[in-house]
Image (cartoon, grey):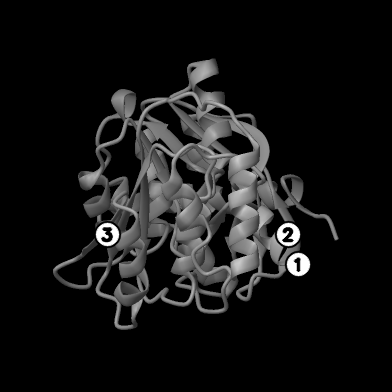
């Protein structure tokens, strides 16, 4: 079982520096670590370098999950990345969990906001720190599959895309598969993005050289959508039809549960972030009801 666990994290792939094999096996027992080293030494290939990927990871009170998130990044088959953890003044032991990873892997960089500021400002702060050509996003409780970066970069470079997303599955708070598969439309235009937030945050990547620095207004909810609405003005978003991540559906969420609250949570997205007048903001809020309903009907599937 330990060997299978290691292969799940490491993907059975060779990675070409020793940092990978040591960090990938952090937290595994000796037998599992030995299995990872066997995988490392048994294969030989050269990975194409597409340039540095800056991974944006805002966090708040995720000490129970962030170690697994970091490991899923360290086990990527594509290793040219920097992980920018931006802490919104967590009151738990998030920093203590992150410190050993930073000590072992200099690509992992932690910064804490001067004060609790919310997710939008936290993402903005991390985006200003980014040095990579490529910007990717992974919240501190979600997971990437090992070939996420490699496959998405290849998809974008070979097709000349500046903005993309991919499919993913959902898991419970304790990591159990929920049997939910989330896909989307092949090409998300500006109009389609205003109708519905097609990409999941953990699935997005864009080319910073072509898009530039993106900053958003301070909206508490749907701030990831606010980002995509800025980016899609520069380039359409294309779907890579492959499951490359796992989204953790947690019991504690900033998304309000009652339907009417979920609907009107979109209003600040259009009124504040997009600076629309109340009438237009209300119109697009209601259009989101239609768009999200369409997405759930046709592109969110149960497979168990």
Q: Quick one: 116 or 94, which is closer to the camera?
A: 94
Q: Position of residue 138 (x, y in %)?
A: 45, 53
The numbered mark at residue 1 is 1
Is residue 233 placed above or below 273 in the rendered structure?
A: above
The quarter of the picture where the C terminus appears is bottom right
Q: Position of residue 254 (x, y in %)?
A: 45, 72
Of the two numbered discs 1 and 3 on the same chain, state the one appearing first in sequence: 1
Is residue 108 placed above or below 193 in the rendered structure?
A: below
Residue 256 visible to an observer of this rendering: yes
Q: Position of residue 224 (x, y in %)?
A: 41, 51
Q: Residue at x 64, y 35 (%)?
A: 43
Q: Is residue 44 left or right of residue 108?
A: right
Q: Residue at x 41, y 41 (%)?
A: 228
Q: Circles 2 and 1: CB distance less than 8 Å?
A: yes
The numbered mark at residue 159 is none
Q: Position of residue 215 (x, y in %)?
A: 25, 45
Q: Circles 2 and 3: CB distance less than 8 Å?
A: no
- Which image quadrant is residue 61 in? bottom left
Q: Is residue 161 left or right of residue 274?
A: right
Regarding mark 3 in the picture, which secondary structure is present there? Answer: helix
Q: CA distance from mark 2 to mark 3?
A: 36 Å
Q: How many marks?
A: 3
Task: Bin the neighbour count of mark 3 within 10 Å (Cα to Cα): few under 14, some 14-19, many 20 and up.
Answer: many
Regarding mark 2 in the picture, which secondary structure is present there? Answer: helix
The residue singled out by tag 3 in the image is: 122
The residue singled out by tag 2 in the image is: 4
């Amino acid at each position: 079982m330990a060997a299978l666990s290691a292969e799940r994290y490491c993907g059975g792939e060779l990675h070409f520096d020793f940092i990978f094999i040591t960090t990938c096996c952090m937290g595994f027992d000796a037998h599992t670590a030995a299995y990872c080293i066997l995988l490392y030494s048994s294969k030989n290939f050269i990975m194409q370098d597409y340039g540095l990927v800056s991974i944006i990871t805002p966090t708040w009170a995720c000490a129970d999950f962030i170690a697994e998130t970091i490991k899923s990044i360290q086990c990527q088959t594509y290793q040219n990345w920097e992980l920018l953890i931006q802490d919104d003044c967590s009151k738990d032991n998030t920093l203590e969990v992150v410190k050993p990873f930073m000590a072992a892997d200099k690509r992992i960089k932690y910064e804490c906001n001067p004060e609790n500021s919310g997710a939008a400002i936290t993402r903005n702060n991390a985006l200003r720190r980014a040095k990579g050509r490529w910007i990717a996003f992974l919240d501190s409780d979600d997971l990437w599959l090992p070939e996420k970066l490699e496959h998405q970069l290849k998809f974008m470079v070979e097709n000349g895309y500046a903005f993309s997303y991919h499919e993913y599955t959902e898991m419970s708070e304790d990591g159990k598969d929920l049997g939910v598969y989330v896909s989307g439309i092949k090409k998300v235009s500006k109009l389609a993005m205003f109708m519905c937030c097609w990409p999941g945050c953990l699935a997005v990547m864009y080319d910073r050289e072509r898009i530039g620095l993106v900053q958003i207004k301070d909206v508490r909810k749907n701030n990831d959508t606010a980002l995509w609405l800025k980016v899609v003005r520069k380039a359409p978003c294309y779907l890579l039809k492959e499951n490359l991540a796992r989204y953790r559906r947690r019991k504690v969420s900033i998304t309000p549960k009652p339907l009417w609250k979920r609907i009107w949570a979109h209003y600040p997205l259009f009124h504040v972030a997009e600076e629309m007048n109340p009438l237009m903001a209300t119109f697009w809020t209601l259009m989101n009801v239609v768009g999200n309903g369409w997405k759930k009907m046709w592109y969110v599937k149960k497979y168990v």
